[in-house]
Image (cartoon, coloured by chain):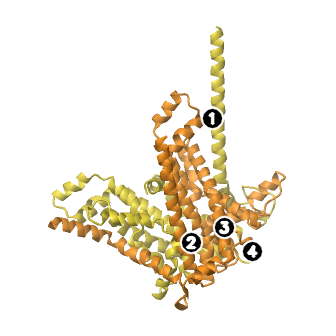
Chain colours: A yellow, B orange
Amino acid sequence: MEAGVIMGREVRKMLNKKIVNIFLKYFILLLITAMFLFPLLFMLSTSLKSIDEIFTRSFRLIPKVFHFENYTNALKTIPYLRYAGNTLFITVFNVVGQLLVSPMVAYSLSKVDWIGKRVVFVVLLSTMLLPYQVTMIPLYIIWQKLGLVGSYVPLILPAFFGYAFYIIILRQFFMSIPDSLLESAKIDGASEFQIYWKIMLPLCKPALTTVAIFTFLFTWSDFLGPLIYLTKQDKYTLALGLQQYMSEHTVAWEQLMAASAMFTIPIIIIFFFAQRKFIEGVVTSGLKG
Amino acid sequence: MTKNKIKTNLFGLLFALPWIIGFFIFGLYPIFKSLHYSFTDFNIFMEPNWVGLDNYKDLFQDRLFYKSLSNTLFMIAIGVPVTLVFAFICAFVLNMEIKGRALFRTIFFMPSLVPIVAGTLMWVWIFNPKYGLFNIILKSVGLKGLNWLTDPSFTKPSLVLMGLWGVGVPMIIFLAALQDVPRELYESASVDGATEWRKLINITLPSISHIMLYQVILAIINYFQYFTQAYVITSAGGGLNVASGGPANSILFYALYLFHNAFAYLKMGKASAMAWILFIITGFVTWLIIKAYGSWGNYGKGG
């Protein structure tokens, strides 16, 4: 009887502790969630408010009236659609270039047994740590001498030589394809190129998708490249154009937030469709790169 | 060498060739060219003119150079630990037994998808002294609002705070590393009666220490190259060609000052010297951390 009471007390104590733990756990979880979510909601909220409502000191998350016209106005204040088109143009060519070249290099560095393989891979890895500032000025001078500053060429052509980051992601994936598969194709008389084109690439669609997504995200959002190379306003990308909602004295916050939201939405959509691949890509490059 | 072997070698080279050519054009040549430029007086309107070590001497007497370096070191000293600890906490929370993990992971990661320019401009608005989210909250609980981006002593901490919002990538990597820690280790520790805290210190942290090291190196290198956020904030409202370091140059970071030198003051020789100093610092930091980690690693194994 005595022992039973003590046991009961112990159990109750443990149960209390468990409840406190669960409560604490979800409290922290929700706190962090709010931290991440609230700025985004603030952005959306501002993008839908009237100017009067933005500049009041009492804050409401949900606007009194939804001013969707902020979005259509934002499209007119700056040549938004033109900039979006420019951004898309650069982005698409970058994706094509990466998909064409990076898998070739990755294949050579994973499945082809040639002398230079190791050296090239080590050099490739070490370029990941190279600060872009070291090459920034000479590259600018090269493009300038070629008369290509102001054009899209400096922002597109380098993609057709492959980037180390994507090559590493692809190589990691290629390594996981069993050699026996390639060997048997070789015995059947397939050439190296046929093996690459007809067996390897179709098998590696998931990794190729990852590379396409990353290239899209990075190019779409890139600021420094366009800042250096795009000199004429009609060639601007969205990343450069956003600042045009600000003038020296006033900022059209509601339009700027609307434009920022529209700028971000394509990325969010892609992320939702390819979330798993995206996260796998981050992890592969981060853990094993 | 057999005919087949030669063929394979040629094929391998051929497939790697685009990157190798790209490496020479976009990597190796510019690296050495910028070393050359760093010894010259030079801009887009003139040919490089050899001046020996003048650019380096100029830098070592330049108050703004030291300012940009100390601003950057501040970000590294405060920003790296704060950001990585926060990233680890987020990953740790996501790795607990919680309902709706996928949803929370998505929410935690989503801010990192917002383009840096858009995100930074959004934060400029959030930090707005009169109508921004933060000061509205502070005032609503009776506190005084802060001058987040205009008071020189707040600007860098504000940027660190802003950086926490975009912590997604290191968070995801920590999360994957946490999921890789063998379950059995925790189970046997539980049997031995270890507390959660002990498990964290004795199992979790040692298991992910190599990932932690990699993240620290990356974070330091990233802060040395920290540019877009500072550029967007300092040029907000002033058009695209302003060379400003923010209030009292408090957010004149290394990469920003380098950019000003190259493209606003057109001192490309001086900027190249800065680039090479950065290159050497980056290499040294990487080497140092890896070496230090090597000795800790051995110590750990010995103990």
Q: Are marks 4 and 2 on the same chain?
A: yes
* Contact, mark 1 vs mark 4 (Cβ under 8 Å): no
Eyeballing the image, is B128 above or below A142? above
Question: Marks 1 and 2, Cα distance to the nearest angstrom?
Answer: 43 Å
Judged left or right of residue B218, residue B147 is right
**Structural crowding at the residue carrying mark 2, measured as other residues with C-alpha within 10 Å and reported as few (<14), some (14–19) or many (≥20):** many
Return the mark for residue A22. Answer: 1
Chain designation of label 1: A
Residue closest to the eye, B120 or A140: A140
Q: Which residue is mark 3?
A: B70
Q: Which residue is mark 4?
A: A250
Residue found 47% across the figure and 71% down from its top = A91
Closer to the chain start, of discs 4 and 2, is: 2
x%, y% of residue B66?
A: 66, 72
Chain designation of label 4: A
Q: Which residue is mark 2?
A: A223
Q: Nearer the viewer, mark 4 or mark 3?
A: 3
Secondary structure at badge 3 equals: helix
